[in-house]
Amino acid sequence: MRFGCCGSLVASAPDRTGVEIVERLADYGYDYIELPLAEMMELDRGGFHALRDRVAASSLRCEACNNFFPARVRLTGPEADLAAAQDYCVRALDRAAQLGAEVVVFGSAGAKRVPEGFPMARAWEQVADITRFAGEQAAQRGITIAIEPVRRPDCNIINTFEEGVAMAGEIGLDSVKVLADIYHLACEEESPGILRRHGAQYLRHVHFSHPNFPEIDGESGPEPLRGIFEAELNRRGWWRTWPSCREEWDYAPFIQALKACGYDGRVSIEAPVGDFQGQAPRTLAFLKEAF
């Protein structure tokens, strides 16, 4: 396995990319950094080149990018504009390619979220159209699109790994596969066994964290959180965190399922953290021991 970190959720600089941690990740022994495309697309040419050069000067590469489409680029509903989405997609993938990324994660919950009352079957077709286009463009750049299933209520389409597999299967391109995120899997109460069934063919990237479910009114687990968006969870301190030890969560079923389907790729930590300097080395040591 190769272990990395998503920069966006630990970002402290104004550009919100998290590139400022790349040198420390290298010092701690991580294998790569994962940077957010939507935030990098907000940088002007000079700003992006400075980011690209900073990564190049480190001993790490940006092997993956997440946060593909910003919420303002509507992908479903009556305001969806396929031509505009395609234009953004090409420009974003060009930047990912300049960084040397091999995987682009397609979660983009805000962009994909289906407006109330809009037909879900039509929304599925809209997501399929842009995913197919992204896959075709990604293939030309040596990139794989990894569809990311996202918990409800943050998104109301493609919430499970099985649904991600259905979308990837419909697209039918080698450059369109699926991501498994232990947090979203736990929130949707989807068994890691799904990875044993479909992982060998479809799994191409992993996000990892501690699903930090609080006890609310005497009940602990994903159910009390179903109607709370991630920004509010984060504000209340109820969101996912960096993993530290086996005792805090039963990680074994997820890790064993990854191994059973033959996965030996990238695993990115995706969670906010208060003490990055103290936590990052501890988490890497735990990952190496657990995997």
Image (tube, rainbow, N blue to C red):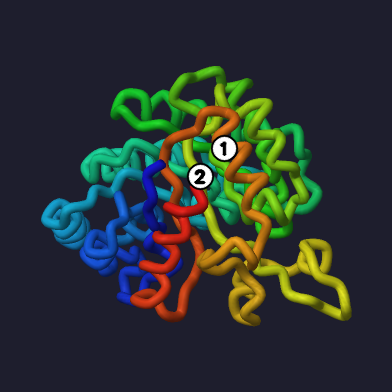
**In the depicted view, which residue is nearer to us: 130 or 173?**
173
**Residue underneath mark 2:** 206
**In the depicted view, which residue is nearer to us: 246 or 199?**
246
**Mark number for residue 62?**
none
**In the depicted view, which residue is nearer to us: 122 or 25?**
25
**In the depicted view, which residue is nearer to us: 9 or 131?**
9
Image quarter hosting the N terminus: top left
User: Where's residue 36, x and y in %?
Assistant: 39, 55
**Mark number for residue 258?**
1
Task: Please tell me whether mark 2 sits on a helix, a strand or a loop.
Answer: strand
User: Where's residue 79, x and y in %?
Assistant: 60, 47
- Residue pictured at 42% horizontal, 68% vertical: 282
Instruction: Name the amino acid type tagged 1.
Output: Leu
Please give left or right for residue 148 compared with residue 186 in the image: left
Mark 1 burial class by Cα count in 10 Å: few <14, some 14-19, many 20+: many
Q: Residue furthest front?
A: 289
Mark 2 burial class by Cα count in 10 Å: few <14, some 14-19, many 20+: many
Instruction: Name the amino acid type tagged 2.
Output: Val
Q: Are marks 2 and 1 in contact (CB under 8 Å)?
A: yes
Q: Is residue 86 above or below residue 28?
A: above
Which circle's residue, 2 or 1, is located before the other in the chain?
A: 2
User: Where's residue 169, x and y in %?
Assistant: 61, 21
